[in-house]
Image (tube, helix red, strand yellow):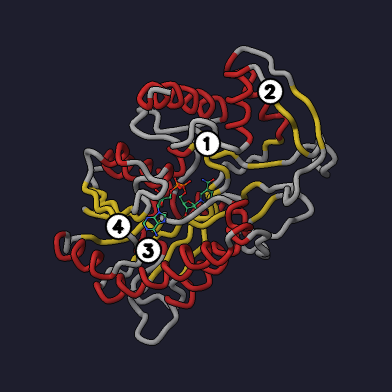
Amino acid sequence: MKKVLITGGAGFIGSTVASALLDRGITPVVLDDLSKGRAEFVEDRVFYQGDIADAALLDRIFAEHPDIEATVHCAAKIVVPESVAKPLYYYRENVAKTVELLDSLQRLGCTRVVFSSSASIYAPTPDARVDESCPVDANSPYARTKQMMEQVLQDWTRGEGAECQRVIALRYFNPIGADPQLRTGLQDLNPTHALGKLIEAHTTGAPFTVTGVDWETRDGSGIRDYVHVQDLAAAHVAALLRFDGVIAPGAADRYRVINVGTGDGTTVRELITAFEQAVGARLDVREAGPRPGDVIGCYAAVDTARELLDWQPRRGIAEGVADALAWRAKWAARLGA
Ligand SMILES: NC(=O)c1ccc[n+]([C@@H]2O[C@H](COP(=O)([O-])OP(=O)(O)OC[C@H]3O[C@@H](n4cnc5c(N)ncnc54)[C@H](O)[C@@H]3O)[C@@H](O)[C@H]2O)c1
């Protein structure tokens, strides 16, 4: 594979995927509206600024790059509280615009798609471990857009004359870290996820609050599966390079879901310990009840990724913490923050 379109390729994950492709000699062609993506992340890359629903722009991209062989569809609005406040905006941006994008891809003959899905669509399970056959039951408008997009994509592979249309949906767990070469990372200096809050507590001396301490986990705190974003990016490269092996052209079932996590659950308290070890300092840790919408969380069964993609995570939480901190320092300096 020589060239791949990446929607949302100026964002956190898409830019890391683009770097991983470049490292493998594959040219990423980035389409991003820069609503959240950063121009700095694409300044040395083939880049089109615009909307995934802009059919004329897709025509232009494929006219200028007829050798694009697949699309990685990362573009989406991703902020859960915003999706609660503005559900129609999320359904339009994520679901309706994905329909438009697929229409363009089908017209232009680019029918191999790797989709950024999310573990947040899984229904809770008694032991928090989820494999790809577990039921889905998304619990926020954002997560429901992901669940709906999966349904749209699956139906797209089943439509009339859809023999060429094939989709691998990668269900990401909790990405952390940054590109180890520090080409890109998170756009926000103070992200609101647990690792972001730990970094904020460490850099400002403010307390870190464990929200929810009565979950049915080994220490009462919520559980997640923290996967290094570089490992996540490597899973995309593997999915692209092995695409025809995962879903053969003309196969009866042309939609495949693959979990991308580490296979290990980490509780919030364990994350704090790992963070303190990585930075060599203790934090002021407090406890509080769960916030509205909080869930016990889940971690991945990763046998499918191992079998189909020959992929396994190579980096642990300590590297995720170290790369996140190094990126934050570099990015803050660049922003003059
Ligand atoms: N970050 C996570 O924890 C996580 C977890 C699971 C799944 N995902 C999925 O991974 C994908 C990438 O997430 P991320 O963390 O990199 O987010 P991000 O916001 O950094 O990246 C998304 C990118 O899409 C672009 N974009 C949004 N709407 C667009 C549109 N209509 N047209 C063109 N570009 C548009 C944004 O400018 C941004 O650069 C998303 O689909 C998200 O749902 C993320």
**Element type at mark 4:** loop
Asked if residue 85 lies left or right of residue 104, the reply is right
* Residue located 28% across and 68% down the image: 110
Q: Position of residue 104 (x, y in %)?
A: 30, 72
Cα distance, mark 2 to mark 3? Answer: 39 Å
Q: Nearer the viewer, mark 2 or mark 4?
A: 4
Q: Nearer the viewer, mark 1 or mark 3?
A: 1
Q: Which residue is mark 2?
A: 273
Whether residue 192 sits left or right of residue 92 in the image: it is right
Is 45 above or below relative to 137?
Answer: above
Three-letter amino acid code at disc 4? Gly
The kind of secondary structure element at disc 3 is strand
Whole-percent x, y for residue 244 in the image: 34, 64
Indicate the secondary structure of the residue bearing disc 2. helix
Which residue type carries mark 1? Ile
Determine which of the numbered discs, if any, sits on residue 50 in the image: 4
Label 2 amino acid? Thr
Q: In the picture, which quadrant includes the C terminus? A: top left
- Which three-letter amino acid code belongs to the residue tagged 3? Val
Q: Badge 2 local density, few (<14 within 10 Å), some, or many (20+)?
A: some
Distance of label 4 from label 3 (alpha carbons): 19 Å
